Image: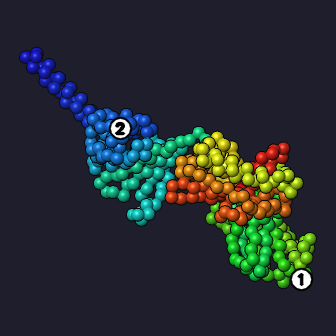
Amino acid sequence: MKKIIIILLLGVFACENSKEAKLIHNLAHITTAKKLDSLLFVLDATLSLEKRYKKTYKSKGIHYNQIPIRELYTYEKEGGYIFYTDSIQPEGKTILKELVEDLGMYKKEVDAYNESDSLYTWKNKYREIELDNYKTNYESITYFFSETYKSPIANASENIKKYTTEPVYYLEVTSNYSKSVLLVNNVNVYETNDSYNKNFSLNKYLLNGNEVIEIAFLIPEKGKNIDELKLDVRLIKKIGKEKIVSKLIKKELLATDKLNEKKIVYTYENEIPYNIKGWAKGEDLSKVKNLERMIENLYKKLGESILKGDEETINKMMYQYEFENLQLKYDDSYEASRDKWVGWLANTLNTYKYTTSKDFKIEISPNKQLGYTYSEDLSNMLIITGKGESKSFDYYFYLPKGSNELKIIR
């Protein structure tokens, strides 16, 4: 009799244990690609590691904090996975509630395909999770692993400063002149031989808010009456979705050192909150000896570093450029700087040769600190060639004080 009771009790325990065994693989704990590798080995040890990916797994005890998973599908290795909740969930539990408890508050987005605001997303530097609950009987959760990089460019977003007010300036210009040159704070922005109606983004030419915004046009004009000049100029300050016409401080008509050329100068208030290095402490390029050779060396060095996959040199050459372009957009998102670095890595992987211009014209801005080149023998100063495609590069450059090497800046 005792033996029978013992056997019955063992049967009960075994039954209870089998119930618990049904939900033994908690996806809430799978937070890295390596942890997913380990889980897939348990789910199917008969397959090689590569073959465990791009595969569907059903039941096998998979759950998310006790919410049963009906199906798990894995993308390519280190890509992530998608799973569907069971149609029957434990009382009092919802996948949204569990995700919020694990990951914090979500961002609500619109599902463009289903025209409903059914998407909930969580993002950080290492992963991205998306919940789609438009289904009535189950929900889908997509989990992407984000590859992280140690390079300075990939992490430039960590050094971006954010401000309460973040203005972006745009210049709206209509010109009827056959030829005109546009300068912003003594930097060449545009030169044309045609009339035009354009919208220019100006933040890339503004280093800080301590100086006014000076918009100047060089035009062929003999007259002296500024009100009769054929220019329509508006400086727009955009803060978020709000657009404001900037306050004009003064407008002047000045002579230049060229015959039959006038300079029209519009001066505006500047509310840029950041203070970036830029070319502010650059040498006078008009006094630099062997400037042409230095330009050739600059583009050759960049081309060589891409060809050899020299990540350290690429970071040294391009970090300031990438960082400042993020700062002037106030973009501190880790995706932005990571994407920039991924782009440079793609260049190194795909390039098998590079070509630099040997015949080019040099243009030095009126402030003498910023230079630009126009290639005469190539479409751009640097061309990298890969399998089935090529990319070209042109940049503004300056010479830091005390340095003997040009630096890329815009």
Q: Quadrant of residue 379?
A: bottom right
> Picture coordinates of residue 345 (x, y %)?
56, 47
* Label 2 with label 1: CB-CB less than 8 Å: no
Q: Label 2: few (<14), some or many (≥20) within 10 Å?
A: some
Closer-to-camera residue (366/175) = 366
| Quarter of the image where the N terminus is located | top left
Residue at 82% across, 69% down = 216
Residue that appears at 31% across and 40% down: 62
Label 1 neighbourhood size at 10 Å, few (<14), some (14-19), many (20+)?
A: few
Task: Write the residue at 50% across / 47% down.
Answer: 123
The color scheme shown is rainbow
What secondary structure is found at the residue carrying circle 1? loop
Look at the image and tell me whether residue 26 can be seen.
no
Report the residue marked by disc 1: 223
Location of residue 74 by image quarter = top left
Relative horizontal placement of residue 385, taking residue 28 as reference (left or right): right
Q: Secondary structure at mark 2?
A: loop
Q: 155 or 284: which is nearer to us?
A: 284
**Measured from the top left, where is residue 262 in percent x and y?**
87, 75
On residue 49, which mark appears? 2
Q: Quadrant of the C terminus?
A: bottom right
Name the residue type under label 1. Gly
